[in-house]
Amino acid sequence: RLGSYSGTTIPPLLNSTSNNLYLNFQSDISVSAAGFHLEYTGLDSCPEPQTPSNGIKIGDRYMVGDVVSFQCDQGYSLQGHSHITCMPGPVRRWNYPIPICLAQCGGGMSDFSGVILSPGFPGNYPSSLDCTWTIKLPIGFGVHLQFMNFSTETIHDYLEVRSGSTETSTVIGRLSGPQLPASLFSTTHETSLYFHSDYSQNKQGFHIVYQAYQLQSCPDPRPFRNGFVIGNDFTVGQTISFECFPGYTLIGNSALTCLHGISRNWNHPLPRCEALCGGNITAMNGTIYSPGYPDEYPNFQDCFWLVRVPPGNGIYINFTVLQTEPIYDFITVWDGPDQTSPQIGQFSGNTALESVYSTSNQILIKFHSDFTTSGFFVLSYHGKCDKLHFFTVSTDYSLLITAGRKLITFSKKSCCY
């Protein structure tokens, strides 16, 4: 309804937005008057507005009062009015010019995904630019940057990406030239991109798609069987290390770093601590486990351990656990570095054993298992002074040993040489 009019006042100019117009005149049974005289003229619609490059147009009616809206593609900014209205009048026109969509030099973003374009993209960027874009997300999120297009003048025109928003933030990429870069991962909730172009050789520039990702920690490696973890920060970029309990050997990398990325993982597989089948041991004290301990040892094992301590020391051996198949699975110990050395003993079954002692500073230990019943054993050893080279002094003075060595002692020491 455009209006309702009565009396002697001339109504204003009316414009219909439809191609049909309905008028209704009503008079009663009494006073008459001169009535009315009106003229009408058909009016065209407003011209169809053009869709801006790198944008879209919303609305397909262009009559008086109709509104058309415009939006830009991701990465572009709208210059002008986002809504225009078809105006009344003898000549139909829109109340504002058609807007345009441009890739801007810098800006701020807070959406969880978006696009960053060099100024003028997909055309060439201008000369003498210094543009900064900043992505700010909630704490706990980082940014994954994927390069869809990239071309700049090598060296002189470049894009610098920082994991952070300050000049002291870590640079995670300084990119230049025609090569398409690999994806980058910023590990802070703020990310900055700085683009510089000099006065010559303008190129197409870049098209970057960014996506937020949650800064989760890498998987907790604990509990770490037969060993322990040093460090308890499992977030991105952090490094932890692993050590084994005595008697176990570390298999794999002793230090792991939590990698960047949408799916958080360590840079190497988790190591493990295993009781191995044999080895060379030089520690003064230690423990030797059956292979696979605390699990049962495998069948068909022939393992050799060579234990060396400093000269002048013997080696005490003590079985703390012994549970093997009697007779067929056994441990043999030689008082020396090979199987031609005197044999100290051969041990099997599950009988509690007394300690045995070598006269040499080296012992060879062999474990053999056959094809049937399994078990396990644990033995500890420690180097101790050979009784033939053992003495005690109780005062503070120097002694000349018969071997010609000079020894200074302090207040009752037990010594080996």
Image (cartoon, rainbow, N blue to C red):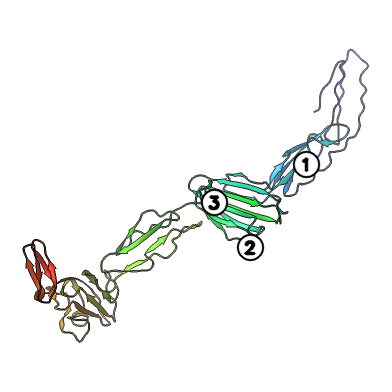
Residue under pointer 3:
162
Q: Residue at label 2? A: 179
The mark nearer the N terminus, 2 or 1, is 1
Give the Cα distance between marks 1 and 3.
Answer: 37 Å
Badge 3, how many Cα within 10 Å: few under 14, some, many 20+? many
Could you say whether the residue bearing mark 2 is in a helix, strand or loop?
Answer: loop
> Which residue has dot 1 on it?
98
Q: Earlier in the sequence, mark 1 or mark 3?
A: 1
Q: Where residue 67 sits in the image (x, y, percent)?
A: 76, 37
Under mark 1, the amino acid is Ile
State the image coordinates of residue 269 (x, y, percent, origin top left). 42, 65
Name the kind of residue labelled 2 in the image: Gln
Kind of residue indicated by mark 3: Arg
Residue 133, how many percent across, how many down?
Answer: 60, 47
Residue 103: image x %, image y %? 69, 48
Q: Residue at x 20, y 78 (%)?
A: 362
Q: Residue furthest left?
A: 394
> Rounded to the nearest whole Å, what is the CA distance between mark 2 and mark 3?
20 Å
Q: Residues within 10 Å of mark 1 (few under 14, many from 20)?
A: some
Q: Quadrant of the N terminus?
A: top right
Return the residue nearer the eye: 262 or 309.
Answer: 309
